[in-house]
């Protein structure tokens, strides 16, 4: 029996996409498009983690495949599971070190969703395991990490800490303030990026970038 060039396998963490290593990338892209278009109704509308297996992919090729999946299915890919063991161990170690330092020395965790009208203030950095909805506000003297959707208002570095930052799995806030600088959402309606984002202050302006291994490694809590 001939093996399919693209195989989608589901697991408790998300979906595994097994790719034929013999096809050219252009042909593989066509196969991914056809596979996800045909499977769109079955896969449904969900937030998933994705892993690519069967062949080595560059970051550019991963980005192209993710864009293809987004355009031809209703899936919201929130992260890619790295199958490079050494790279995964390094990334996990770095993340754990930062979260451990945040929790034990300079911050705390909060679990739950913040609804409209709720205001929470912290004298430390804060990791929120949930969503900040429109009309909700979080104020922190340090950093704010949102392991969920950020739709409301966040004020980081309320003590004047200019190197404070805001991280969210889905970044689409009404307003972000870092130190004395405020950035507001555009009046134009745009879809939020699907990758985790980090907002930081540089040269008197707030910038928002995709959170990568490099930016995570460069974070100074």
Image (cartoon, helix red, strand yellow):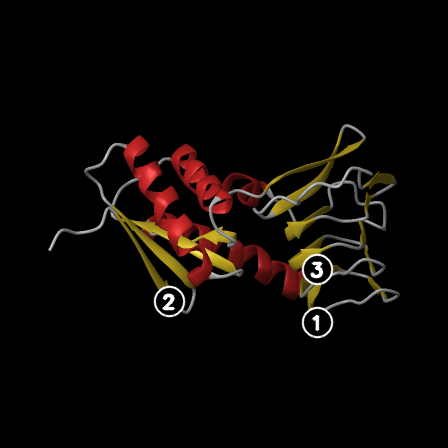
Q: Earlier in the sequence, mark 1 or mark 3?
A: 3
Instruction: Tell me which residue sits at (70%, 41%) in the image.
Output: 190
Secondary structure, mark 1, is loop
Instruction: Tell me which residue sits at (78%, 37%) in the image.
Output: 188
Q: Earlier in the sequence, mark 2 or mark 1?
A: 2
Residue at mark 3: 106
In screen coordinates, is 131 left or right of 28?
A: right
Q: Which residue is at the far top?
A: 203
How far apart marks 3 and 2 lie (CA) works out to 36 Å
The number of numbered discs placed on residues in the rendered structure image is: 3
How far apart marks 1 and 3 lie (CA) works out to 20 Å
Secondary structure, mark 3, is helix
Residue at mark 1: 112
Q: Earlier in the sequence, mark 3 or mark 2?
A: 2
Looking at the picture, how far across and down is residue 82, in whole percent?
A: 38, 51
Looking at the picture, how far across and down is residue 134, in whole percent?
A: 81, 57
Residue at mark 2: 11
Callout 1 environment at 10 Å: few (<14), some (14 to 19), or many (20+)? few
Quarter where residue 150 is shown? bottom right
Residue placed most toward the observer, 66 or 209: 66
How far apart marks 2 and 1 lie (CA) works out to 26 Å
Callout 3 environment at 10 Å: few (<14), some (14 to 19), or many (20+)? some
Secondary structure, mark 2, is strand
Q: Nearer the viewer, mark 1 or mark 3?
A: 1
Quarter where residue 105 is shown? bottom right
Instruction: Tell me which residue sits at (32%, 31%) in the image.
Output: 26
């Amino acid at each position: 029996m001939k093996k399919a060039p693209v195989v989608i396998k589901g697991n408790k963490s998300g979906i595994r996409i097994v790719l034929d290593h013999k096809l050219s990338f252009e042909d593989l892209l066509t196969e991914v498009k056809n596979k996800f278009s045909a499977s769109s109704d079955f896969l449904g509308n969900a937030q998933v983690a994705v892993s690519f297996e069967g062949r080595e992919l560059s970051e550019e090729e991963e980005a192209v495949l993710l864009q293809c999946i987004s355009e031809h299915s209703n899936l919201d890919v929130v992260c890619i599971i790295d199958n490079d063991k050494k790279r995964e161990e390094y990334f996990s170690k770095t993340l754990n070190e930062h979260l451990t330092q945040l929790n034990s020395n300079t911050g705390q965790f909060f679990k739950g969703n913040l609804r409209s009208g709720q205001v929470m203030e912290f004298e430390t950095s804060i990791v929120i395991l949930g969503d900040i909805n429109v009309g909700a506000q979080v104020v922190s003297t340090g950093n704010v990490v949102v392991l969920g959707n950020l739709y409301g208002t966040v004020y980081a570095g309320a003590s004047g800490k200019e190197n404070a930052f805001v991280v969210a799995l889905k970044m689409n806030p009404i307003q972000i303030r870092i130190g004395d600088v405020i950035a507001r959402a555009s009046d134009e309606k745009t879809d939020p990026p699907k990758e985790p984002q980090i907002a930081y202050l540089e040269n008197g302006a707030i910038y928002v970038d995709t959170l990568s291994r490099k930016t995570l490694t460069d974070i100074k809590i």
